[in-house]
Each structure stands twice: as structure tokens, then as C-alpha cells.
């Protein structure tokens, strides 16, 4: 009797051991799959007629390497699709999307990134991330004012470099060029637009013989940038020779208070110099 009980006990123990091993293999050998969109970062404000850079961060929270697609939407319209190949467990990848907004109009947009559901994935809520409402803006315009001017030899005249439709301008720099055989610079002065936002630092480097000035200006301190439009620079010239020349903007760099680049449209100016007494001085803003 005792021997039978011992045999039964051994059988029960072996059965429990087999069951335990099976359960251990089931729970501990089962792979976990989970892809998560961590966030969407816009490198600057969004502008129309521009290749806006957007960064989407994705993490593999699972136990195996995963391959999948990530789709970026703007108001439910597909912007682009990026493929992730063999993202290792617990690793993060930053995907760079370019949103070409050529032909779009200023409007409100919500950006949404969505990762494909991988085989075996059950938590799919974190496969999607969307931003708050973002504004698609018109690019500011940097131009000469007036755009076209006719003067006489020996005459002094003033041109302004102006900006319009800008948001949060904190600093700017550019190179202004002209024909040195026709024009001579009398003065270069900072305009009043950026000063309206606080104290500024202004620097100019004039090369009169080559016909250009490199100018730089920035707000100082922890202040917001200036929005709207106004004059950045005022230049007084003296007309020294007969002819025509463009007033060119080059090496333009605009930045906001978050140190993001602000794209812009650049419009050159034009000056015609005539002999004294050949007609009236004229200017045009278009």
C-alpha cells in the first residue's frame, strides 16, 4: 500500500513538474511586440511653398527587432511614408520627413504619425501620435524699398531693406550688393523694426571698393521676437556714374527666438542713373 502511494506521489510530482515547465516555457519564451510613436518635432514654424522638416521619434518597446512603416499625415492627407528596417529592442529611431507645401494656402493643420501594427502586437494605441493645431504660414518677404528708382549723377538717395509678414523675428543678417562703379555708399544705419522689440546689437562690414556691405542685427536677452513688418536697414547712396544696376540681397539668414531658421522670399531692387537735367527722379514700389 505504501509502495503504491509512493508511486502515485512520484507520478503526481512529475506531472506537476512537466506542467510547471510547460507554463514557464509559455510565459517566458513568448515574445512581446510593441511599437510606440514618441513624438513629432517641427524644426521651425510651418511655411507654405517650402520643404518643412519634421522629425518623428519611434521606439521599439518589444523583445525582437521589428520592420515597419511610419506614415505622416497633415489633416488626414498623407505627407510621406518612411520605412524602418530591423529596429532593435529598446532602441529609438528619429525619422526625418520633408513636407513640401508648394501650392497650399495658409491654414490650420494637425500632424499625425502612425506606425504599422507589427505581428503579435496588442497595444496599438501608442502606434499613433498627433500634434496640437499648427499654423501654416506665408513666408516673409525681404525686399528693397523702393524696388526701382531713377536718379541723376551726383544725387544722394536712400534705399531701405524691409521685411513683411514675419513672425517672431529675433535676429537677421544679409549681404547687400551694388555696382561700385555707379554707386558710392554715404551711410548704413539700422532700421527701427527689430528695435521695437528691445535692445539690439548691430554690426556692419562695408567693402566700398567691391560694392557690398555685410550686416548683422539681433535682439539681446530673453525676449520674444518681433512680428509684422518694417525697416531692417537704411542705406544712403551717392550716384557717381551713368548706368543701371541691381541692388542684390545675398547670404540671408533670419532667425526666431527659438533659434529656428525663418525662410523668406527675397526681392532685389534696381537703380537707374542718368545725366543731370535728363528728367525727373522717379521711384517705384512694384
Image (cartoon, helix red, strand yellow):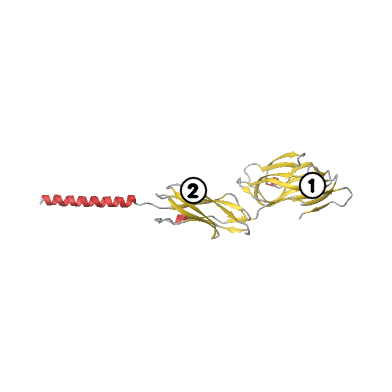
Label 1 residue SS: strand
Q: Look at the picture and state if 106 lies above or below 197.
A: below
Q: Residue at x 47, y 47 (%)?
A: 92
Q: Position of residue 141 (x, y in %)?
A: 69, 52
Q: Secondary structure at mark 2?
A: strand
Q: Which residue is disc 1 drawn over?
A: 158
Instruction: Tell me the residue that label 2 is attached to.
Output: 93
Answer with left or right where residue 219 lies relative to residue 244.
left
Q: Position of residue 139 (x, y in %)?
A: 65, 53
Q: Is residue 163 left or right of residue 149?
A: left
User: For the C terminus, which image quadrant?
Assistant: bottom right
Tell me if residue 199 can be seen: no
Q: Residue furthest right?
A: 277
Report the number of numbered marks: 2
* Nearest to the observer: residue 165 or residue 71: 71
Front one among 127 and 183: 183
**Picture residue at 79% right of the left edge, 44% below the top:** 236
- Residue 71 visible in the displayed image: yes
Q: Earlier in the sequence, mark 1 or mark 2?
A: 2
Q: What crowding class fits label 2: few (fewer than 14 Cα within 10 Å), some (14-19), or many (20 or more)?
A: some
Amino acid at each position: 500500500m505504501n509502495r503504491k502511494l509512493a508511486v502515485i506521489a512520484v507520478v503526481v510530482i512529475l506531472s506537476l513538474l512537466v506542467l510547471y515547465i510547460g507554463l514557464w516555457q509559455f510565459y517566458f519564451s513568448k515574445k512581446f511586440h510593441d511599437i510606440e510613436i514618441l513624438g513629432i518635432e517641427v524644426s521651425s514654424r510651418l511655411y507654405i511653398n517650402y520643404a518643412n522638416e519634421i522629425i518623428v521619434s519611434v521606439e521599439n518597446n518589444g523583445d525582437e527587432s521589428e520592420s515597419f512603416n511610419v506614415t505622416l499625415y497633415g489633416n488626414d492627407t498623407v505627407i510621406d511614408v518612411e520605412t524602418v528596417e530591423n529596429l532593435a529592442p529598446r532602441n529609438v529611431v528619429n525619422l526625418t520627413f520633408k513636407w513640401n507645401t508648394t501650392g497650399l494656402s495658409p491654414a490650420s493643420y494637425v500632424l499625425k504619425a502612425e506606425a504599422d501594427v507589427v505581428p503579435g502586437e496588442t497595444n496599438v494605441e501608442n502606434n499613433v501620435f498627433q500634434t496640437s493645431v499648427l499654423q501654416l504660414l506665408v513666408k516673409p518677404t525681404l525686399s528693397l524699398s523702393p524696388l526701382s528708382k531713377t536718379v541723376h549723377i551726383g544725387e544722394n538717395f536712400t534705399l531701405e531693406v524691409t521685411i513683411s509678414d514675419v513672425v517672431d523675428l529675433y535676429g537677421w543678417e544679409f549681404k547687400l550688393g551694388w555696382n561700385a562703379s555707379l554707386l558710392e555708399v554715404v551711410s548704413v544705419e539700422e532700421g527701427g523694426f527689430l528695435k521695437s522689440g528691445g535692445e539690439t546689437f548691430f554690426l556692419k562690414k562695408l567693402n566700398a571698393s567691391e560694392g557690398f556691405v555685410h550686416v548683422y542685427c539681433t535682439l539681446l536677452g530673453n525676449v520674444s521676437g518681433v512680428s509684422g513688418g518694417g525697416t531692417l536697414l537704411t542705406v544712403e547712396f551717392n550716384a557717381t556714374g551713368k548706368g543701371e544696376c541691381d541692388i542684390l540681397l545675398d547670404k540671408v539668414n533670419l532667425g526666431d527666438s527659438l533659434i529656428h531658421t525663418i525662410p523668406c522670399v527675397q526681392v532685389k531692387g534696381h537703380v537707374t542713373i542718368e545725366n543731370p537735367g535728363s528728367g525727373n527722379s522717379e521711384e517705384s514700389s512694384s
